[in-house]
Amino acid sequence: LADVGGEKALAPQAGMKAGKGDPWAERHYKVGGGWVGGVVEFPPCPMHMTYAFTYIVCDKDVAGLSLFTGSDDALLVVLNGEVVQKVQVQRGYNMDQDRMDGIKLKKGWNRLLCKVDDYMGGHGLVVRFKTKDGAVFTGYKLCMTPEPPVGSNIKLVDGRQYEAEAYNLLKQAI
């Protein structure tokens, strides 16, 4: 990704090409290959790296969050250009395998990049934020496209709506 500023500066959009990899594509995963309670399950692709990226939009600065992740296999998490988590393992993924405290989301647009390094078999990713009291943080909106000019009409997914939908999908999957 050196030709687009590296992982710390990355702000991808659909169709963007970086290096020799596939172009970035906007994808919304479903149960049995997708979003299940905050889980992204990627197709099997041994010995490959897969990137997941989203914008997190907050109405105010939020400090003291904990970032909970799970990955199959190794994981690198970059938030607003800063590496906040690096886990070098070979494992299947589950909810809340790893935790990083002291996470801050700034008012406005935050960039979240996750890189999953798969060794063998299927691979996946679980990401969520919790508050100091252990509650799942929902004070955000998600957006798949870069910050638009003022007055543009874009689609934002409310954090409460996302968490409720993810919970229902997880319940149905079980």
Image (spheres, helix red, strand yellow):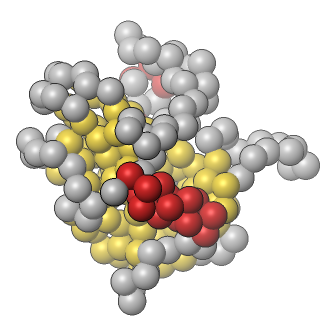
Tell me if 76 is positioned left or right of 121 in this view.
right
Give x and y (percent) for residue 71: 24, 48
Q: Is residue 118 visible?
A: yes
Give the farthest residue toward the top.
20
**What residue lies at 42% left-to-right and 68% top-to-bottom?**
129
**What residue lies at 61% left-to-right and 54% top-to-bottom?**
142
Point out the image quarter for the N terminus: top left
Give the farthest residue toward the left.
90
Give x and y (percent) for residue 148: 77, 42
Image position of 26 with respect to 132: above or below: above
Image position of 140 with respect to 85: above or below: below
**What residue lies at 65% left-to-right and 74% top-to-bottom?**
60
**What residue lies at 26% left-to-right and 64% top-to-bottom?**
96
Q: Is residue 109 visible?
A: no
Point out the image quarter for the C terminus: bottom left
Find residue 98 and report its image quarter. Answer: bottom left
Tell me if 164 is positioned left or right of 131 in this view.
right
Find residue 7 and report its image quarter. Answer: top left
Give the farthest residue toward the bottom.
133
Q: Nearer the viewer, residue 63 or 118?
A: 118
Give x and y (percent) for residue 6: 40, 31
